[in-house]
Image (cartoon, rainbow, N blue to C red):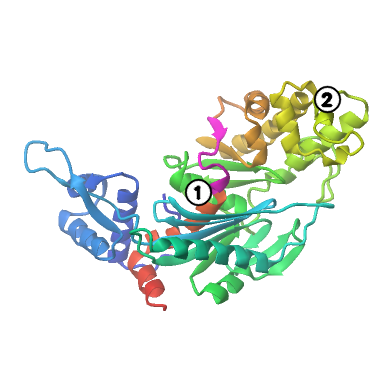
Amino acid sequence: MLSLENSDNRSVREKNRSQILQAIKMQEAISRIELAGQIDLNPSTISRAVNDLEEMNLIQEREVGESSGGRRPVLLGINKSAYQIIGVDIGATKIIAVITNIQGEILEKYHYRIDYPQGDVVDISPELVLECLERVLKKYQRNINKSTVTDKIIGIGVGAHGLVDKDRGRVIFAPNFGWRDIYLQKKIKEKFGYKTIIDNDVRVMALGEYWFGYGQNCDCLICVNAGYGIGSGIILNGRLFRGHRSLAGEIGHTTVAEDGPRCNCGDYGCLETVASGPAIAKMARTRIKRGRESRITQMVDDINISRITSELVFQAARQGDDLSRQVLEEAGSYLGIGIANLINIMDPQLVLVGGGVSRAGDFVFASLRQAVSRKTMEDPPPISPVKLGEKTGAIGSTVLILEELFKAPESFLSEELHRF
């Protein structure tokens, strides 16, 4: 469950705590005896580590289990209410900020929609991200006195659209916002004071599903985001795979249509040009301009078909519109080709698909699965929509903080809780 860096300077005692914390996380409730059966540590070491974790409020005794002939065992579980994390998903079409407990359950949420009135670039500033974080914090603080939750926020995780340098905390390039070399981590930390970690928005989607979604029992997982753009996050051998230059997973810029449309990257036939949300809308507009009949024209002014969006195509498909269904089927087929390429290379246990295009359901997934079956060497792995829906990225962003907490609980909490 936990992805660790190659260098590991933790003490033996810290490693033991981490191992036990992870084992407890994977179970709703587990006894000390069951822990001893799962972990290669002696009972006294397990008992000492459990006591340490209880003192940190990370775990607690939950209930009494069934007896196997002797004394009924006390079961341990994660103390989900002890600490909270802020997560923010800065996607191409929305910003979602959440506050969760350490079990990934959302306690507060703020949603900001990003519109593109003209062109492919929108004027979004880093300050807007700070404002969204401030809004979700204020909402949470207003409600905190009405509940029994203890207000102990321990960090902010950020998933950002575009190319992201996690180690330096900067957005290298976010094409839809026109951002270049934005040191977002520093801006957020200076504003709010919490430990802050940033990464690419699709990679944190994979983390969200790996920790709290359908990918919890998968050591090799691919999560594809098909929305305004297309990208993928890859969990390989239980670790998030970023690649040599943090560019891994750019499936949207793999070629699936040799004679296809020109992409914003300068190449032709990229997956984004034939299967993204804007591509679906463009295909529908082009065919209507060429004389194809569609009930989409009843949804917008006949002389203003530029207002056609992928959402309108989805709606028309649900109403039985042949043109819309054909467009979605073609997009799903191209998306399936791109995913099949990843499957042939990575051999994952599971493929999850999120983003706006996934909301078209079987209009996209039927042809997607057919294309994958045609293009893969063996029987393909299961392919399904993400479990966490549009909140996948925001919840996944909190995992950036949770990874650090679970890796070295005492060191992390000592640093964060004594900061103020």
Label 2 vs label 1: CA separation? Answer: 38 Å
Magenta residues, as a range?
A: 382-392
Where residue 45 sits: x, y (%)? 20, 59
Q: Position of residue 301 (x, y in %)?
A: 87, 36
Left or right of 138: which side holds 255? right
Give amino acid for label 1: Gly
Residue at 53%, 30% in the rendered image: 381
In which image quadrant can residue 178 be found?
Answer: bottom right
Which label number is shown at residue 294?
2
Q: Indicate left or right for 202 with 416 as reference.
A: right
Please rate how many residues cluster around mark 2, counting C-alpha atoms within 10 Å: few if below 14, some from 14 to 19, many from 20: some
Q: Nearer the viewer, residue 176 or 168?
A: 176
Residue pushed farthest left? 70
Decide whether residue 249 is among the magenta residues: no
Decide if residue 17 is in sight here: yes
Q: Residue at x 73, y 40 (%)?
A: 276
Q: Is residue 395 above or below residue 358?
A: below
Q: Tell me the kind of residue under disc 2.
A: Ser
Residue drawn at point x = 69 percent, y = 56 percent: 162
Q: Is residue 219 above or below residue 180?
A: above
Q: Looking at the image, which is closer to me, 129 or 214? A: 129
On the image, which quarter does residue 60 sit in? bottom left
- Residue 6 visible: no
Q: Is residue 235 left or right of residue 360?
A: left
Q: Nearer the viewer, mark 2 or mark 1?
A: 2
Task: Return the mark for residue 41.
Answer: none
Crowding near the residue tagged with mark 1, few <14, some 14–19, many ≥20 C-alpha atoms within 10 Å = many
* Sequence order check, earlier mark of 2 and 1: 1
Q: Tag 2, which secondary structure?
A: loop
**Residue, disc 1:** 208
